[in-house]
Amino acid sequence: MRHTCSILLLAAGLAAGSVRAQVAIEGTVQLPKPSVDRGLNQRYSASADIALAPTNPPAAVVYLEGDFRSTQASAAKTPAQVAQKNIAFAPDLLPVLVGTAVEFPNMDDTYHNVFSYSKTKRFDLGRYRKDEKPTTVVFDKPGAVTIHCEIHERMRGTILVLETPYFQKTDPAGRYRLEHLPAGSYVLKAWVAGDDVRQRPVELKTGMTFHVDFPAK
Amino acid sequence: MMLVVLAVTTATVYLAEKNRRSNQQQLLDAQFQNRVQSFLKIQAAQSEAITEKCLALSHSVRLRAALEERDVDDLYQNALTELEEMLDRTGASPDATRASFFRFFDGDGLILSPENHPAGLTDQPALQEALSRMAKGLREDDEQAVGFIALARGNRPSALRRIVLTKIRGPNGKMLGALVVGFPLTNLEDTEVDRAGAIQSGIWLDQRLYIETLSLADRQLVSERLRAASSKETANHFPIDLESGPHLLYYKALDPETQFAPAYQVCLYPLSASIRDEQALRWKIIAFGLVVLSFGFAASLFVAKGLSKPVEKIVAGSVENLTRRKQAEEDLRETNRELEKALTELKATQQQVIQQERLSAIGQMASGIAHDFNNTLTPILGFAELLLENPRLLENRAETRRCLEMLRTSAKDAASVVSRLREFYRPVETDEEFPLVDLAKIVQQAVSLTEPKWRRQTQATGLTVEVVAEAKASPFVAGQESALREVLTNLIFNAVDAMPQGGRISLETSVEEENAVIRVRDNGAGMTESVRQRCLEPFFSTKGERGTGLGLSMVYGIIERHRGKLEIESAPGQGTTFIIRLPIADASAMQNPESSAQASAKSSLNVLIVDDEPRVLEVVSAYLRCDGHSVSTAASGREGLEKFRRNQFDLVVLDRVMPEMSGDQTARFIKQVNERIPVIMLTGFGALIEVSGSQPAAVDVVLNKPVTLDVLRKTIGKLLHAA
């Protein structure tokens, strides 16, 4: 399956090549349909949980995999943010470079308690309110970290810790555009969900814009 | 003369015997069924509580997260914290409400092994195998399933476990895994304190019989009959002849819907015991006949004596006559003794019947209390959650205060529900003295207390449920405040359940002809005539699995107790109106409640509090500190005693049940050191002590937990005043 995709994509990519001053890749990731909320047994959800049901639109992260250790020094000095707003994580998918610090401010009038049991990064911020500032978490290992709120069972988010500075989150339609890429051979990957990572090799040449689509597996 | 007596006696004995025969069988059946039913009811109530708890647990975010990450360590650690109260860590005696083990399955039905975690039962192959089989049998749509497994072969019911499987689903409804909790099964004997060997009970599981005491032949016999019977009916009873004598066998499927191996509760009632009873009764009847006969003889003797007096004079002194008379007197004394014996036996039998009635009542009461207790917990949970979830609310002092007052009222009600257990060892008082209560106020409180429930319903469905109190008058009645509140909260809960489409509930208070009247009106689904007629019966419910069928029967009981009347007006689609009429009391007779502040001791005291429960310690210290006393605390009797020896105290407050050294012992030691220091004992068994009169000598006053500030103050005031 993956091979078929790659061949298709390769053809598409070459056809779209155009002359530019720098290397760029653009394209579309075919995203899964928004999941239907099963409406978990409401008897056991906290009352504040019931009123809301914002199912976050699906999104993916596209990134270039390779050895970029030399360029990493310049990455992410300012901490990134995953806020809790309207009983949801905003954003609910955040790609960061390894070593990035992330803040988790509470914008709601209720308590939140963000934690993760992921092997990549375990942490537990405890309960805090709007006016309390929880500790900042540094994500020092690559991998996907699923985050939860202990109080609100439907809150769920992912922090994707990457070893490359070349990544972008797609828009809700699945479109992306990566710019200022170095020339060379790499693997371009699209992270859609924990077990759905699509990839294909790319040969980047200076001054070209490539077009790579990632259809559903 | 003799003939008439003989004829009458024979006829009486014959009729009594005939009547007895037909009654006996019916009585036996009814008695047995009654006991088995109440036993099963208790079991059902326990099981319901267990499944609810598991369902709540399956929604824990932490458990889900750990399961998703397949982090077994976190999974068991978190579950252990949540299940702490439910898990039986001692393993000493099986208790059906306490889980003997728990496990998690992953999404593929494989057991996640609880390495290094005390999740109960070591991983024996039998358990692994049985649970894996269950995981495979779980249907896609089921959130929860109940089944039974045997941990070991053999006949002992203690090898059996009731298994509650609860699915844990991920954000998209995908099954992440399942929580499995195993409970031992209750045995009927455990709940009976009756004659030895009265009823044997066990389980018929997967074509195998688990009853400990049967012989091999009997076991086979019972198994055969059950195999045949259970394939046709899920519950039935029939007589069966065993080696040990004739028995009545009753069986019932424990969970008829189960997709797992079916399990049946089996009860055997020995008819031999009842045959003994029957024979005893027959002898009593014959003895009674003899007595009547002898009276007849005596009477005829008397008449004969009168007639033959002149003749007798002639033969006076005749030795033969004298012997005969002595013989008759001896006979009379003999029958008299028999009669007395029969009477005592009859009394004993009667006592037994009463005891049996009580036991079945305990069964109903237990589920009743669980039901009411849950009702009072609803506002406690609701308001507490409200305060925790909305930090803004805490800044509004008036609103916070209102919530806290609601919490206190509900907690007091919960305490009074538990105190109702006392009615089992307290002789029923025919003239209960009630204080005067303001009905309109109680209505208002009931509306506020139920608010979390109907507000939540409104939020959940988006359809408005409105509850309003309309006080046209504000009459006083003699009554128990908490019981009357319970009546109204029950009616409001029912009304809310009857209005899935939303609607309006009104509680109108008025005065009509010497009666205080409350009308609880809803515009919900209403009842059909047959439902209306049956709705007050215990265990009658239209709410299916969600209902216990006890709410309205409680309501009815409470109103009866208050010498009131309950009327119901209802028609399908027209809504329902409950009309409660209570006799009005003279409000002018109402006394001003004694101001609690006055009763409190004026001076500041040095108080020692001993309790192993830190929360009780905290609350009682806060109470006393608030009144300006200085407080020292101790977490055990030993520590308390040490502090007592080293410091000067004016008063000791201690718990009764503590590990190491009990409250009774501690009190005794304290009195040995200084017998003039008053000792107050706080106990969950206060009511029991009060009734049975077993108050420990070293204790001055016994107070019931939970204790309120007011009661504590008054007691301290009284004690020190007396001193």
Image (cartoon, rainbow, N blue to C red):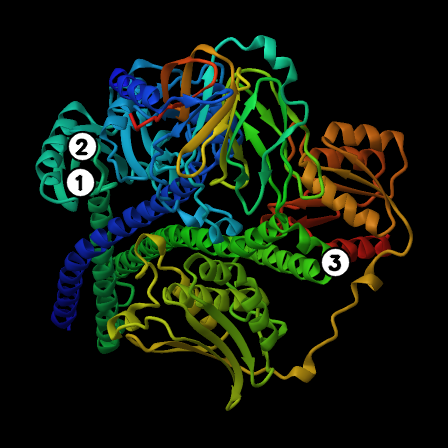
Residue B699 is at least partly visible in this image = no
Residue drawn where x is 54% and y is 10% of the image = A68
Chain assignment, label 1: B
Closer to us: B281 or B35: B35
Vertical arrangement, residue A182 with respect to residue B683, above or below: above
Q: Which residue is mark 2?
A: B244
> Is A216 drawn above or below residue B628 in the view shown?
above
Give the residue at x 41% y 18%.
A188
The circle on residue B710 is 3
**Mark-to-mark CA distance, 3 and 2:** 61 Å
Q: Amino acid at mark 1?
A: His
Earlier in the chain: of badge 3 and badge 2, it is 2
Amino acid type assigned to the residue bearing label 3 in the image:
Asp
Q: Are marks 2 and 1 on the same chain?
A: yes
Distance of label 2 from label 1 (alpha carbons): 9 Å
Q: Label 2 is placed on what type of residue?
A: Ser
Residue A96 image offset from top left, x and y in percent:
56, 24
Q: Chain of mark 3?
A: B
Q: Which chain is mark 2 on?
A: B
Q: 10 Å neighbourhood of mark 1: few (<14), some, or many (≥20)?
A: many
Camera-side residue of B549 and B587:
B549
Asked if the residue at tag 1 contacts the one at tag 2, i.e. Cβ–Cβ closer than 8 Å, the answer is yes
Which comes before the other along the chain, label 1 or label 3?
1
Mark 1–mark 3 distance (CA, rounded to whole Å): 57 Å
Residue hosting label 1: B247
- Taking the image as shown, residue A196 lies to the left or right of residue B409, namely left
